[in-house]
Structures are given as C-alpha cells and as structure tokens.
Image (cartoon, rainbow, N blue to C red):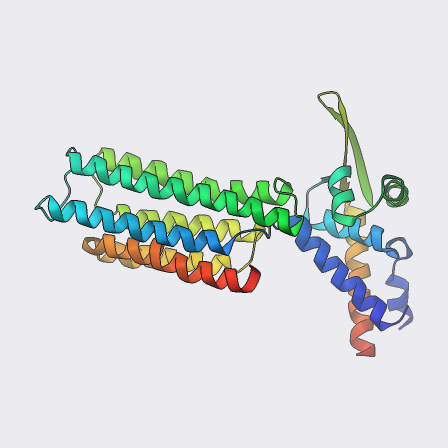
Amino acid sequence: MGSIINNINKAFDHRIRLGIMSILMVNEYADFKTLKELLGATDGNLASHTKALEKEEYIRVEKSFIGRKPNTKYSATKNGREAFKKHVEAIEKLLKQQG
Amino acid sequence: MDNSEYLKDISEIKDMMNKSSRFFSLSGLSGIMAGIYALIGASVAYYLVSISGRNYVILDGKLFTYILLDLAIVAFLSIVTGISLSIRKAKKNNEPLWNGASKRLVSAFLVPLITGGIYIIIKISSNHYGLTGSLMLIFYGLALVNASKYTIGNVKYLGYIEILLGLICAIFPGYGFWFWVLGFGVMHIIYGSLIYFNHG
C-alpha cells in the first residue's frame, strides 16, 4: 500500500497539470493556445502550471516565431512520460483495491 | 483524496486524450448524403450505359467521358457536403475546426486515397480498368481505417467492410458496378445513419 501511495505524484495533483500531461502523452507537441482552449484555463493560470511541470523537467518548452508572432510549443520529456504512466498506474491500483 | 476524486482524474485524463487527438464533429448526415449521391450517380451511369445499347464501356468513347464526369460530380458533392456539415457541427459543439486532430485526420485519410486514385488513373490509361470498382473500394477502405484513429473510432469498421467488399469484388470483376453501389451507396447510408443517431 505504501509503495502505491509513493507513486501518486504531487506534481500531477491538479486538474490543469493533469490535463497538460494527458494532452502531451497523445500529441507530439501542443502550443500554448491549443492547451488553453482544451483546458479552459486563463493565460496566467496555464503559464504557472506549465512552469511547475517544466521545473520538474516533465515537459519541454520550445519558443519560436511564426512570422512575427511568438509561438510556444510544449512536449513531454521521457521523464515526464514515465512519471505520468506511474501516476496513472498508481491511481488505477488504488481504485482496484478500494473497489 | 478519496475514490471519487481519483475516478474523476481518470475520466479527465481520458477526456483530454480524446479531445486533443480526435476530431469528433464528423457529420453522420454527410455520410447519408454521400450514399444518396452515389446511388443517384450510379443510376445515371446505369441509364447512360443502357441507352447506349451496349453492355460494356469503351475507354475512348463519349460514354466513358460522361461516366467519369458523373463520378467526379458525385465525389465533388460528397466532399463539399462533408466539409460544410462538419463545419456546422464543429461550431455547434464548440470544437475548433482546424486543430491538430482534424489536420491529422485529413492527412491520414488523403494519403491512401490519393495513392489509390493515382494508381487507378495509371491503370485506366493503360487500358486496365476491369478492377476499377474493386480498387476504389479497397483504397477508400484503407483510407477510412487509417483516419479512424483521429475521429469517431467505429469509422474503422466501415473501412474494414469496404476493404472486404473490394476484395470480394476482385474475385467477381464483372459485378464491379454492383459492389460499388453496395460499398459507396448502401454502406454510406447505413453507416451515416448509425453515426447520426449515436453522435448527431
């Protein structure tokens, strides 16, 4: 039981962060606007959550320009993918045990 | 956190994975319309062949040009209807029309379809048009199976059915016309109705 709880990752303990990771698990990358639309978050809110995940090195940020418009692209790192998988597995195990 | 919170997390994860990778605003109605266009187009072709007094089509005749034109009109109307009804549905569902999912849907669909189209044109221009119906069904089926990863999942079963019809048709090339009617007309109407009643 203790080991399962250990795998529940505090970094994913928020709807927006959970959403960002879910989207980046099935998409090679997503830009800021896409994440915002999908998650229904404000600019500031989304920015603070992407920063938190970036700090954990779970996601990678790539800044570029499309013409003159700045474009920020996010993708999941290998670490991030593994951590998220463990997190989901831990949740599933917990749910099974408590059934 | 208790159980219900975890359950909510899991459903949130699934929802985000689906929403971000699949385009759901595919219109069932446009499938039904495509089937109706195909049946009308096939009737026109049948009529054209029957009034020509022959039972076969020769490649360089006027009849052949008319039938190609007939096919092109069916394809054009189906595509225009499909796009415009999807735009309408996406607006209603508040789903962005041109996002990562719909881009991937279109390219996954078009690669097998255009490959097949070019292949068929090459074969026709070297006088091998006996299997055109079968090839159209097979490549269209492959396009559907390929695209189904990015939209309503059960589109892939329609793809399998089209491939199967195409393969059976290859065994009975003389009945190409009827397999075409079944695959592009009848199956579209049936499948379009299923999507329409399940997803709108």
Seen in the picture, residue A13 relative to B6 is either above or below; the reply is above
Q: Would residue B74 appear left or right of B8 to someone viewing this image?
A: left
Looking at the rendered image, the quarter that the C terminus of chain B falls into is bottom right
Q: Quadrant of residue B71?
A: top left
Q: How many marks?
A: 0
Q: Nearer the viewer, residue A48 or A26?
A: A48
Q: Nearer the viewer, residue A93 or A30?
A: A30
Residue B80: x and y in percent read 45, 41
Residue appearing at x 77%, y 46% in the figure: A78
Residue appearing at x 91%, y 57% in the figure: A10
Return the residue found at the far left.
B53
Residue appearing at x 39%, y 42% in the figure: B77
Q: Would residue B50 appear left or right of B131 to someone viewing this image?
A: left
Looking at the rendered image, the quarter that the N terminus of chain B falls into is bottom right
Residue B75: x and y in percent read 37, 42
Return the residue found at the far top.
A68
Q: Is residue B128 visible?
A: yes
Residue B124: x and y in percent read 24, 37
Residue appearing at x 34%, y 44% in the figure: B74
Seen in the picture, residue B92 relative to B98 is either above or below; the reply is below
Q: Is residue B59 visible?
A: no
Q: Would residue B139 appear left or right of B178 to someone viewing this image?
A: right
Seen in the picture, residue A78 relative to B161 is either above or below; the reply is above
Residue B130: x and y in percent read 21, 46
